[in-house]
Image (tube, rainbow, N blue to C red):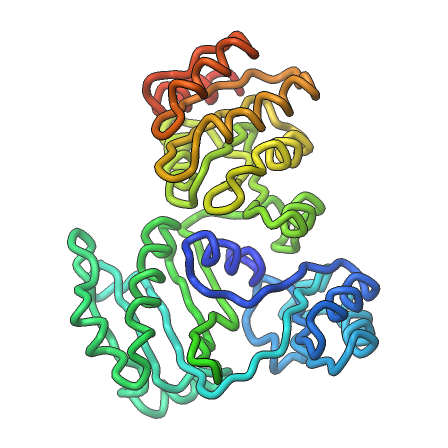
Amino acid sequence: MTLPEHQAKAILAAAGLPVPPGVVCANAGEAAAAAVRFGPAVVKAQVPAGGRSKAGGIRFAADAAAAGRAAAALLGGTIAGHTVGAMLVEPRLDIVRETYAAVVADPATRGPLILFGPNGGIEIEAIAAADSGALRRLPVDILDGPAADALVRLVPEVPQAAGFLAGLYRVWREQRAVLVEVNPLALLACGALVAVDCKIVPDGAGTAGDGQPTALERQAHALGLQFIELDGPVGVLANGAGLTMATLDMVRHFGGRPANFLEIGGDAYTRARAALLLLLGKPGLKSLVVNFCGAYARTDVMAEGVVAAWQALAPAIPLFFSVHGTGEDEAVALIRGQLGLTPFERAEDAVRAAVEAAR
């Protein structure tokens, strides 16, 4: 399944790649309120399908009232067989150039392939079909990753895109994706690059429903948390997108099914309490594994938020910790003293215990 745009962009943002600010809205009133913040805005139907622009699923609004009308027109409509149940509202950007960037699984080489087009936009497929040189290709050795000098040679018109492509490749690896595509990757008048639109097709992964944002996902977006609801019973809370994905992989490795993607990296690490409150609102949750590994972020600060929320809510599900890094001793002492639990020495053991408890 193709992830809807807001979920794909949340993954890019968690990886440190530039995306526009945006608000996921469920009705016209929310869209109008978001546009008050942004001014001239873009209202985008959130469906797991391409071709939204040609189907009228992306509309420009000069002000809040126009954004509300656009959202009302989109809501309940159908695009590529998907009913529009939510919109993403973003500010209009001052774009001076549109390019194309993607990482795909290449059947010919049985490895990753980085693609870059100096001209992006909605006609990229037609352009590529008419001109075989419109998309430049960089096969990548999956063991070594892309070489920095090779990326620079790929993007002479937009040198800053080399670093973006390196980050996009990391997302492809971490997501175990079939495709990660940014179209357009826009150069703004200020000289910055930004992913205006993004498509991620995970390898066999799916969301909790039909690609529309769930109530919990909308709540998380409003809180500034990167959250994707999945269909399993094993809850996962970790810091950093890479560690979160590794923890989800471990859940699957031990025969379990993760309930969510939820990471509290970057400046969100102080919001462990809000993150836990969000996760405990998911129906069908049977166990929770908390995997913290701190470098600059302190694990004791994150653990303090989790412990406080756990004590306040007293949920009747088993909880398992793995804590390493900055503030580890303080975090372990806090968890033992307040919850009577001893964190596992190895993350694998904490995940295995959570999977067994959920059965």
Determine the residue positioned at 51% across, 25% down: 303
Q: Residue furthest bottom?
A: 130
Asked whether the viewer can see residue 76, the reply is no
Determine the residue positioned at 54% across, 30% down: 235
Relative image position of residue 340 (x, y in whole percent): 52, 7
Relative image position of residue 11 (x, y in whole percent): 47, 54
Q: Is residue 205 above or below residue 270?
A: below
Q: How many marks?
A: 0
Relative image position of residue 162 (x, y in whole percent): 28, 71
Q: Is residue 143 above or below residue 42?
A: above
Residue 345 picture quarter:
top left
Q: Is residue 20 above or below residue 277?
A: below
**Of 217 and 239, the residue lying toward us:** 239
Residue 181 picture quarter:
bottom left
Asked whether the viewer can see residue 273, the reply is yes
Direction from residue 299 to residue 66 in the image, left or right: right
Residue 16 picture quarter:
bottom left
Relative image position of residue 249 (x, y in whole percent): 38, 36
Determine the residue positioned at 68% across, 59% down: 24
Direction from residue 309 to residue 298 in the image, left or right: left
Determine the residue positioned at 43% across, 32% down: 298
